[in-house]
Amino acid sequence: MTLRHLLVFLHVCDEGNMTAAAEKLYIAQPSVSQAISELEKHYNVKLFERLGRKLYITMAGQKLLTYARHIVNLNNEVEEVMRNSNENSVLRVGASVTVGTYVLHEVIKKFTKCNPGAKVISTVNNTTVIEGMLQIDQLDIGLVEGRVQAQGILQTPFMTDELVLVSSTVHPFAKKEKINPSDLEAMEFIVRETGSGTRELFESVMVDKGIHWQISGVYNNAETIKNAVKVGLGVSVMSRMAIQKEVERKELAIIEIEGMYFKRHFNLVYHKNKYISPVLSKFIHLCIDYVT
């Protein structure tokens, strides 16, 4: 028994005879007769009584009719839902903390405006956690500031970012137009947690320059770091976009370092075996075209 058999059966019921059902289905009348005969043999019942030229549905036929309508309608519903699934998909997006705090909400806002049928579920954590979630298919795509370490994860740059040295406005550095890298020797820094892309970049540049530093605090979010820097618990290296408002309000100061830069790309990351659905493809292209 196939869906085709049930469709033929429903048309015979609705039309009252096999010839009219065949015309509706655009098939030959013998094909309709064969489908009904195969159904009757399959269930070992009579579906219609043939009295003269008229067909009369039997009690068994009535039982099948109820199920057949339900099955065919359910199949039509599945077809409609699946054909529209690309426009009404749930997209699971992860972001590392800096991207999640200052970029992600604008990206989602633009995406949902252009794709009103799509739903975005977002997660914000450090780069290492987002990477792990991609590996076990808990996320479809990630937006991160750190380098991806795991094999099988592809990455594509989608925007640039710059980290800057920040201090309180009363810190001795704040009174200087520029400092030398050597001025950072043994300086107390407030840093992000292990696994953060921001911390990874900070440490790699400091090691490259041969500068030793001390840690006065480890925090997993930008707001806590900014508050600690404001009250003089140390200096920090943070995304420029994270401290713009505080600098404008003269709550924090950006310190330029001679010949020392902390620049990076924010990356789109996803598993190499991930199926790039039309809705995911749209999200990727929106991110690549994104301009802050």
Image: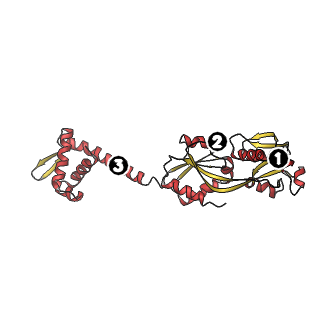
Which amino acid is tagged 2? Thr
Of 61 and 41, the residue lying toward us:
41
In the image, residue 141 lies at what x, y percent? 56, 49
Which residue is depicted at the point 60% across and 55% down? Answer: 108
Which SS class for mark 1? loop
In the image, residue 76 lies at what x, y percent? 35, 51
Residue 56: image tag:
none
* Pointers 2 and 1 in contact (C-beta within 8 Å): no
Which SS class for mark 2? helix
**Residue 175, picture quadrant:** bottom right
Residue 128: image tag:
2
Q: Is residue 101 left or right of residue 235?
A: left
Which residue is depicted at the point 75% across and 41% down? Answer: 219
Q: Is residue 286 left or right of residue 52?
A: right
Q: Is residue 244 left or right of residue 53?
A: right
Q: How many numbered marks, from 0 up?
A: 3
Q: Is residue 34 above or below residue 248?
A: above
* Mark 3 or 1, nearer chain start: 3
Q: Are there few (<14), some (14-19), or many (20+) residues within 10 Å of tag 1?
A: many
Of 243 and 275, the residue lying toward us:
275
According to the picture, the residue beneath numbered tag 1 turns out to be: 235
Which residue is depicted at the point 64% across and 41% down? Answer: 128
Residue found at the far top of this picture: 44
In the image, residue 179 lies at what x, y percent? 86, 53
Which amino acid is tagged 3? Asn
In the image, residue 193 lies at what x, y percent? 72, 40
Residue 75: image tag:
3
Quadrant including the C terminus: bottom right
